[in-house]
Image: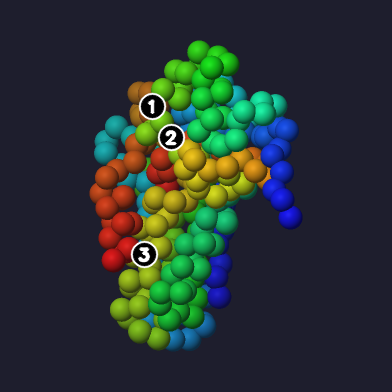
């Protein structure tokens, strides 16, 4: 079965990412050129200076696709939810 | 037997230890993490990613079961506002042997600190708030199990 690129993706935010963006989630229409996590982040950065500010240091961010950790190179194919948050600090 | 739970209310560590002990084996290790006071801290606010948290905790428990011969694992992590001295987390393991039980419990806590989607915010007595940052020592401890 070929994996499909979704037309839209739900993005959820946590911790200071959520606070600085002023929202905990949003549904994003995906432009055709956006195929992986890094391109999606770049797309958001180009959309609004707030994203440029909050996502300015990618080393301070972690990403999860459909509830599993991924890197910037991860494909968005078949993905329903992307989470963007700082490194975890539980325990 | 694996039991993972994410809750707002407090837990009874003694009862959890007793439940795992009932599985037999003879070696039970437990770790309880509490909110550490420093004279200026009022509380911690624990946030998590509900859709991912239990999945991440279960994955850690599955990994521990693969590495050590265990009868059971219990992981409980609280969320919400927790005052100084309150319990945050319990990791409990049960095995036939002391070393397996202790090592597995230590492994679970080291992994939990680096891959379970929880975030701590410190709320000081003067009302100021700040998100806790990851510590290199936690990353090193988790990485130490790779060898």
As rendered, which of A91 and B9 lies closer to the eye? Answer: A91
| Chain of the residue that carries numbered disc 1 in the rendered image | A
As rendered, which of B51 and A74 lies closer to the eye? Answer: A74
Question: Depth-wise, is mark 2 or mark 3 nearer the camera?
Answer: 2
Alpha carbons under labels 2 and 3: distance apart: 24 Å
- The x, y position of residue B91, in whole percent, is 43, 63
Residue B135 shows up from this direction: yes
Local SS, label 3: helix
- The x, y position of residue B29, in whole percent, is 37, 72
As rendered, which of B28 and A36 lies closer to the eye? Answer: A36
Local SS, label 2: loop
Image quarter where the N terminus of chain B lies is bottom right
Local SS, label 1: loop
Q: Which mark is residue B107?
A: 3
| Chain of the residue that carries numbered disc 2 in the rendered image | A
- The x, y position of residue B50, in whole percent, is 60, 46
The residue shown at (70%, 27%) is A29
Establish whether labels 2 and 3 are both on one chain: no
């Amino acid at each position: 079965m070929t994996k499909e690129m979704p037309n839209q993706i739900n993005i959820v935010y946590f911790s200071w990412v959520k606070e600085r963006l002023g929202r905990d989630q949003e549904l994003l229409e995906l432009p055709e050129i956006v195929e992986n996590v890094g391109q999606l982040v770049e797309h958001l950065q180009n959309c609004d200076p707030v994203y440029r500010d909050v996502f300015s240091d990618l080393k301070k961010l972690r990403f999860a696709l459909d509830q599993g950790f991924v890197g910037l190179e991860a494909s968005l194919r078949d993905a329903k939810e992307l989470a963007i948050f700082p490194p975890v600090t539980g325990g | 037997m694996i039991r993972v739970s994410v809750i707002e209310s407090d837990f009874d560590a003694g009862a959890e230890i007793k439940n795992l002990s009932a599985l037999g084996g003879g070696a039970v290790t437990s770790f309880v993490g509490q909110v550490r006071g420093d004279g200026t801290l009022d509380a911690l606010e624990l946030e998590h990613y509900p859709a991912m948290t239990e999945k991440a905790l279960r994955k850690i428990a599955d990994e521990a079961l693969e590495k050590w011969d265990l009868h059971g694992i219990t992981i409980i992590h609280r969320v919400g506002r927790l005052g100084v001295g309150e319990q945050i987390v319990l990791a409990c393991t049960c095995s036939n042997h002391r070393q397996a039980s202790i090592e597995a419990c230590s492994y679970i806590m080291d992994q939990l600190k680096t891959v379970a989607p929880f975030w701590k915010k410190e709320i000081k007595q003067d009302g100021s708030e700040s998100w806790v940052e990851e510590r290199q020592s936690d990353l090193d401890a988790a990485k130490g199990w790779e060898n």
